[in-house]
Amino acid sequence: MKQEIVLVGLNHLTAPVSIRELITFPGNEDGATTRKFLAIKGVTEAVVISTCNRSEVLLVVEGPAHVTEEVIQLVSDIHRIPAESFSQFLYLKRGRDAVHHVFRVASSLDSMVLGEPQILGQVKEGYRRATYANATGPILNRLMHKAFFTAKRVRNETGVALAAVSVAYVAVELAKKILGDLKSACVLLIGAGEMAELAARHLVGHVANPPIVLNRTLENACVLADRLNGRADTLDTLKHYLLEADVVITSTGSCESLIRKDQVEKIMKKRRYRPLFLIDIALPRDVEPSVNELDGVYLYNIDDLQGIAAENLTERRQEAMRAEKIVEDETAKFMEWTASLSCTPTLVAIRNKLEEIRLSELARSNGKLAGLTPEQREAVEIITRSIVNKIAHYPISCLKKTKSKTKQSLYLDVAQELFALSSETDIACQENHDPEKKRQDET
Amino acid sequence: MDIIFFQAALICYLAASVGYVVFLFTSAPRAASLSSICCQIGLGLQVLSVIHRAVVYGFFPLGTYFDALSFLALLIVGLFIFLDRRLSAPVLGAVVAPMAAGLMLLGAAFSYQTRVPVAPILHSWWLPIHVVFALAGNAVFALMAVGGILYIFQEWLIKSKRIGRVHRLLPSLETLDKMNRHGLPLGFCLLTVGILSGALWANSAWGQYWGWDPKETWSLITWFTYAAMVHQRIVLGWRGKKAAWLAIVGFVLVMFTFVGASTLLGGHHSISGPGIGASRT
């Protein structure tokens, strides 16, 4: 019986956030929610992928069943919201489109932030829950593993996840290129504003030492220092801390320059020219732009960082085009495999038919063979079996090797005629789970 | 036979040069890994070439310019492979591989002889000690210069805010400065031992420690330059761009001392005659 991969879902492109946050598939930690989809008639396998930007149900459907309505109803029941409220935002993909979509999602080509790395982990988690609940079978097992493989290829062969695309990450990447390992670096924040906190958040995560927060009013400094697990001090101590710091983020609302060139020049000498990375996100500027001319001092302002982030995003988009080719490639390979699945029942039927003939012929000659010793009997058994295997070998390998879909379906028809199988094909289909094929699925 | 190994090694280094340049322009990781394999095969072949020549000579094959330059290339590539493992900075190869190939071509152009009658003075155990230390020092200085070139390039990219693909390809300023920081004392010690062993050899061969031949003079100038660098770095805290420039200048001086001084200015290190040191002026 024909099996089809079906995907129903919504994402950041089709649904507003108010809908996305409603559909979260609660109670799915152990895959219990995923299992509910198996109860729908015709569904043989299921995986649920749910992140803050997408909710998708991936199913394998057997026969002519149209499961979309049942899926929508079930989603509506699970979340206790009317189907009409979200059904208009759904997309439905079948067969090749569904495979292609899953591969793109896992490779982070369908993400809100192109190339962001978390999505792969979230897809893996969805799959893990489904396997925990025994909701997957040969087709989705292979599909999900191929999706992970595609994501790995995309990550290794293209630069789609390479360059930082947010200001905070750009700052971290730059700091690494200037100071090397950031573990032992010292981060100094001047000004306790929200922007500084935003810019410092990621940076502080890479550093072992507690950051230092300086502010005109000590209370505000303390508040931010608490949040960042750092130390607080007043702005008068700036000179002292500039000697210690490796990365300085300034964000005060001061009208005059806080850090001047002549001042930094003296400090650099005292620092023995240890590199100093200054990030000025204040407007008007806190740091004199000419400070960048000093040896060992690297000054970036918020415009510089935003410019880099924007450039990197363009670069990611270009890399994404190469990634799409990889996804196409892997989709085609997967579809080839599913096509080969359709010939498996016929192959099994041919083997069964021949085995049946062998056994019946042996039984007929039973009287004549009665005088044989057990060894001789064994030999006859082996001979007949190997004759059958030899006869089956060429037709079977021919059917397996045929790549073109039209040619293959022609061959299958011919084989069914030649071996008089037509009545048995459907029965053989149920033996889909023979051990040999299972091994194939797992690779 | 040895020349076949030599040529094969040269081809490997040239292939690696092309691969690393491709890597520089495309960031394709496969280009870097293939080039790295080329370098390793080339190094193996070059070692075979040296062993073969040693068998033919019956002694350390370090007596001609060809051998010395080839051995220097070998040391540089070996050091690069070691550093690439430690720092995972394949982009260094874009300078190192052409440099090694260039040194080998230079050596081949100078003096390749299959069977050199070895001057009796070179049949001394001082030869490997003196030459290996001096060349190892040179190899370290070469890598320091490569680090210096990349440092200046990377620092220019960061200062002028050209933060793109090439910037990400290059190692961090800290890594490149570390090459200088660690290379300087190491190379300086090796050079010092090289010069001292040369002086001792001269004394045992000619009864005189120092003959002021052009190479000796220039070696001394090089030694003082690097001594000054060590001083600046340790006492004055020079680092980064200044140290990088000094490493480049130092290596130019090293190469002049190594190749230029004796070919242009003569002396007992010169390549006139069958081997180095054959003629004592």
Image (tube, coloured by chain):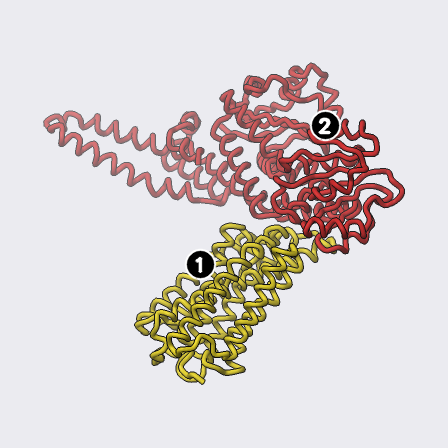
Of the residues tagged 2 and 1, which is closer to the observer?
2
Residue under the image location 44 percent in, 79 percent down: B111
Alpha carbon of mark 2 to alpha carbon of mark 1: how far?
A: 51 Å
User: Would residue A423 be seen by someone viewing this image from the given angle?
Assistant: no
Q: Quadrant of residue B67?
A: bottom left
Q: Quadrant of residue A102?
A: top right
In the rendered structure, find residue A281 and report the number of the disc placed on it.
none
Q: What is the three-letter code of the residue carrying label 1?
A: Gln
In this figure, which residue is indicated by the disc labeled 2? A227
Residue under the image location 62 percent in, 59 percent down: B150
**Residue B267, above or below A48:** below
- Closer to the camera in the image, A67 or B176: B176
Chain identifier of the residue bearing label 1 in the image: B
* Labels 2 and 1 within one chain: no
User: Would residue A434 be seen by someone viewing this image from the given angle?
Assistant: yes
Image coords of residue A19 (percent x, y): 73, 24
Chain identifier of the residue bearing label 2 in the image: A
Q: What is the three-letter code of the residue carrying label 2?
A: Arg
Chain B drawing hue? yellow
Image coords of residue A280 (percent x, y): 79, 44
In this figure, which residue is indicated by the disc labeled 1? B40
Residue at the outermost right position: A255
* CB contact under 8 Å: marks 2 and 1: no
Chain A drawing hue? red
Residue under the image location 39 percent in, 31 percent down: A421
